């Protein structure tokens, strides 16, 4: 794996200017200019008290309540599993993805230029002849295929001003997004801890933004030396892993695989992955690091003092009501409040110590127990709610979990709730340790970068994640799947494995090099509506119908 420290980031980006001292002066001058821009474009301290999401797994709570959604049992999974060779991925699948991506970038660059011409008056131009690369790049960045509600949270003219200043100084358009933390450790979302084709799809989507910008940039400046644009992913798993009980070695392995995928896809010149903790430790001045730690400590203390006394696992409805009234950072546009929504998402994000400590269970039994307990987590077990009194579909969905007595499951449910309540306090405190600083710490480390985000907020560009079957699922919160679109194309996206296997999707895994055992984590799934049952059939379909469009 190629590791990028803060020093390596600075050195690498300076190569686009050929004079590191001049580049550093330009960067610092640009930072001063950006600080003078109106506040609508820039960072706003603190969580928005009307609406600002902090996590993206809200859909799982409703999904888990449906007893007809069931994972494949072990023998069924292996009977359906399609095992392929590495060469079928490298020589067959990857060229299809990258060829479609190249066409897509050219289309988006052309569409951005057309929109810039149409909006010439908004940019202060009286005719089309004075529209330049900066206006077209602005339109590309705000393209709905790339960003969600970008113009709502960012002033178009001011964004254009930033881009124009970079082009005038022949600086690359640097972009950054915190993302790709780790594969969420829920058996309802994925069957393993490593990136799958969903993460590769996410990396490719970042490349498409960069490449579209580059096409436009080089149309105006064909002799520009060095890179015209690049995306940095700040992989923030090391920020949240302690809260959800994800091990540090797993974070390292996940990030190594992400870097491997950038090489496989040929993106490593354009997209790189840096670790959040490393970036903060190497890039933040000591006084800001100290302030960040102080905010974290105060937020943990404040939330613990406010919320632990009202926690009652025996009456979670009353607990939710009290939490909404007591939370320190209310979200008025959310009827449940910020903390309760976060808690419900974290239920399906945790790697529960209380479940992992149960000895003598195989993975399938542990998964069955997880499936039942997470669906039941806000409701106590009593004699009259024992699984035997529930409907047939719920009993089938519970699998081996039905063999445990209700008293045992109630004790385990309370232990899991205790874990997730503490995790929610830790998580919100960690969020505040960034959001309550005077400046976004990522931009303190990487000044002048265009700041992208998963969750829309003022002065940042929210990356587009189109809803599939009514839910928007990030790559790390699901499993990759090829699905047909409503217009006769095939799209690569991510969905929870619970939903995929309930719909009869075919799991596809790459054969292990040492040929020992059977791979257990699919690289992707094939939706059964595509109507193919082998890799040759899938490749034939993809050659004719694969699309990189997010909305089609």
Image (cartoon, helix red, strand yellow):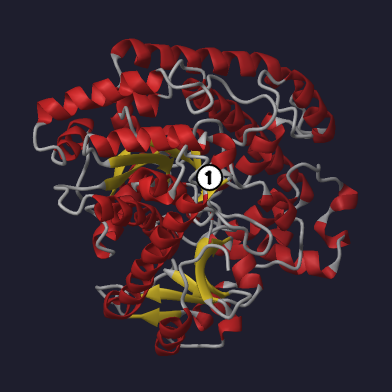
- Which residue is the extreme one toward the left? 19
Q: How crowded is mark 1: few (under 14 residues within 10 Å), some or many (20 or more)?
A: many
Query: Which residue sits at x=22%, y=53%?
Result: 269
Using residue 352 as the reference point, say whether residue 330 is left or right of it.
Answer: right
User: In what element is the residue under mark 1?
Assistant: loop
Residue at position x 44%, y 89% from top?
A: 537
Between 141 and 418, which is closer to the camera in this rendering? 141
Q: Name the quadrant containing residue 396.
A: bottom right
Residue 361 visible somewhere in the drawing: yes
| Residue 352 in sight here | no
- Residue 365 percent across, percent down from the top left: 60, 61
Q: Is residue 142 above or below residue 296?
A: below
**Residue situated in front as seen by the camera: 329 or 50:** 50
Tell me: residue 289, above or below residue 59. Answer: above
Residue at (67, 24) in percent of width and height:
49
Q: Mark 1 points at which residue?
A: 351
Task: Give the vertical position of 203 relative to 249 (above or below).
Answer: below
Foreground residue among 248 and 159: 159
Answer with left or right where residue 529 lies relative to residue 155. right
**Picture coordinates of residue 359 (x, y %)?**
53, 51
Q: Say which quadrant the C terminus sits in.
A: bottom right
Tell me which corner region of the image, top left, top right, bottom left or bottom right, holds residue 285. top left
């Amino acid at each position: 794996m190629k590791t990028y420290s803060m020093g390596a980031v600075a050195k690498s980006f300076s190569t686009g200017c050929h004079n590191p001292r001049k580049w550093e002066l330009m960067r610092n001058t640009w930072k001063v200019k950006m600080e003078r821009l109106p506040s609508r474009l820039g960072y706003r301290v603190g969580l928005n008290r009307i609406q600002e999401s902090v996590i993206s797994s809200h859909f799982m709570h409703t999904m888990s309540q449906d007893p007809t959604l069931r994972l494949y049992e072990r023998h069924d999974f292996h009977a359906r599993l399609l095992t392929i060779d590495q060469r079928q991925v490298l020589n067959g699948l990857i060229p299809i993805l990258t060829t479609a991506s190249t066409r897509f970038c050219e289309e988006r660059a052309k569409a951005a230029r057309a929109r810039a011409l149409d909006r010439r008056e908004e940019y202060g131009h009286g005719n089309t002849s004075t529209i330049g690369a900066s206006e077209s790049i602005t339109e590309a960045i705000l393209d709905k295929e790339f960003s969600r509600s970008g113009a709502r949270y960012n002033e178009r003219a001011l964004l254009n001003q930033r881009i124009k200043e970079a082009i005038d100084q022949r600086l690359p358009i640097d972009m950054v997004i915190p993302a790709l933390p780790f594969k969420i450790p829920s058996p309802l979302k994925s069957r393993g801890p490593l990136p799958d084709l969903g993460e590769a799809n996410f990396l490719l989507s970042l490349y498409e933004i960069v490449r579209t910008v580059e096409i436009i940039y080089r149309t105006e400046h064909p002799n520009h030396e060095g890179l015209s644009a690049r995306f940095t992913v700040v992989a923030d798993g090391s920020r949240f892993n302690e809260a959800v009980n994800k091990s540090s070695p797993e974070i390292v392995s996940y990030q190594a695989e992400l870097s491997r995928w950038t090489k496989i896809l040929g993106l490593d010149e354009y997209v790189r992955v840096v670790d959040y903790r490393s970036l903060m430790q190497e890039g933040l001045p000591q006084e800001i690091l100290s302030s960040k730690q102080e905010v974290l400590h105060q937020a943990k203390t404040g939330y613990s003092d406010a919320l632990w006394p009202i926690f009652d696992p025996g009456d979670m409805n009353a607990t939710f009501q009290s939490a909404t009234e007591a939370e320190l950072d209310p979200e008025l546009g959310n009827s449940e409040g910020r903390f309760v929504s976060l808690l419900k998402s974290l239920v399906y994000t945790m790697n529960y110590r209380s479940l992992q400590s149960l000895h003598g269970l195989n993975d399938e039994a542990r998964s069955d127990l997880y499936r039942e307990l997470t669906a039941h987590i806000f409701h106590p077990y009593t004699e009259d709610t024992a699984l035997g009194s529930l409907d047939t579909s719920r009993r089938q969905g519970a699998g081996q979990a039905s063999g445990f007595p209700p008293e045992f499951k109630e004790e385990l449910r309370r232990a899991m709730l205790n874990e997730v309540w503490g995790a929610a306090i830790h998580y919100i405190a960690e969020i505040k340790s960034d959001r309550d600083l005077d400046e976004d710490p990522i931009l303190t480390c990487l000044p002048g970068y265009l700041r992208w985000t998963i969750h829309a907020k003022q002065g940042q560009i929210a990356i587009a994640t189109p809803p599939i079957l009514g839910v928007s699922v990030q790559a790390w919160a699901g499993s990759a799947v090829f699905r047909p679109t409503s217009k006769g194309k095939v799209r690569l996206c991510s969905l929870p494995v619970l939903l995929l296997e309930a719909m009869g999707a075919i799991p596809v895994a790459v054969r292990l090099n040492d040929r020992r055992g059977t791979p257990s984590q699919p690289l992707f799934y094939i939706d059964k509506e595509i109507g193919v049952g082998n890799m040759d059939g899938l490749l034939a379909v993809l050659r004719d119908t694969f699309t990189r469009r997010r909305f089609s």
